[in-house]
Amino acid sequence: MPTACIFCQIVAGNAPAQIFYRDDQVIAFKDIHPLTPVHLLVATTQHIASLNDTGQDTAALLGRMVAVARQLAIEQGVHQSGYRLMINTGADAGQSVFHLHLHLIGGRHMPFRFG
Ligand code: AMP
């Protein structure tokens, strides 16, 4: 566990977070700077720097992240109005925390645009 990784610190219980779900593989918590009324992060409990560090052996884990996000969307009441799942990977995507996570955003209309 890289001690400098903030999400590893959250997994270990050494940094505060509003946790909505956790199991042995996945943890979900509120984004500290929410972009939308609902903005949760679904992260792996294991340190994986980015989607580029996954492969066939992590396919089930990625599926679990999406399944957890879907369940959270239901619990947050955005499954009917709509929501978006997003995995930023690398510099051009603006990835700022290099610990694999997906964003679950919703709760308002979200026009798709670049920039
Ligand atoms: P990304 O740009 O995809 O790497 O997203 C990283 C996200 O993590 C950003 O939306 C940050 O607001 C969020 N974030 C950073 N530090 C924390 C933290 N300590 N607790 C919760 N969310 C965080």
Image: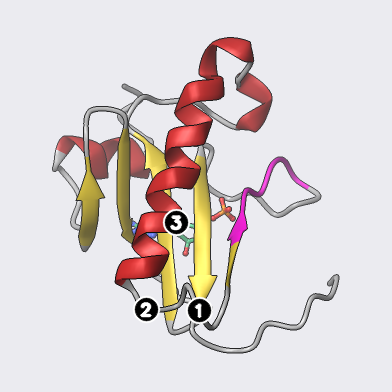
Front tag of 2 and 1:
1
Report the residue marked by disc 2.
77
Q: Name the main secondary structure of what is drawn in magenta.
A: loop
Mark 1: which amino acid? Gln
Quadrant in the rendering for residue 44: top left
State which region is magenta: 85-91
- Would you identify the image quadrant in which residue 26 lies? top left
Residue annotated with mark 3: 70
User: Horizontal and vertical percent for residue 107?
Assistant: 49, 84
The answer, for residue 90, to whether it is visible in the render is yes
Locate the C terminus by quadrant. Answer: bottom right
**What's the distance in space between the residues labelled 2 and 1, CA to CA?**
7 Å
Residue 75 versus residue 15 in the image, above or below: below
Q: Quadrant of the N terminus?
A: top left
Q: Secondary structure at mark 3?
A: helix
Which residue ends up furthest to the front in the rendered image?
80
Mark 3 surroundings within 10 Å by alpha-carbon count, few (fewer than 14), some (14 through 19), many (20 or more) = some
Q: Residues within 10 Å of mark 1 (few under 14, many from 20)?
A: few
Q: In the image, 11: left or right of 107? A: left
Q: Decide which of 66, 5 is in the foreground and name it.
A: 66
Residue 108 drawn above or below residue 80: below
Element class at badge 2: loop
Asked if residue 19 lies left or right of residue 28, the reply is left
For marks 1 and 3, give the CA distance.
11 Å
* Residue type, mark 2 in image: Gly
Q: Which residue is mark 1?
A: 80
Q: Amino acid at mark 3?
A: Arg
Q: From where the camera sits, is residue 31 visible?
A: no
User: How many angstroms separate mark 2 from mark 3 (CA)?
Assistant: 11 Å
Q: Among all residues in the image, which is located at the extreme bottom?
A: 108
Q: Earlier in the sequence, mark 2 or mark 3?
A: 3
Residue 49 picture quarter:
top right
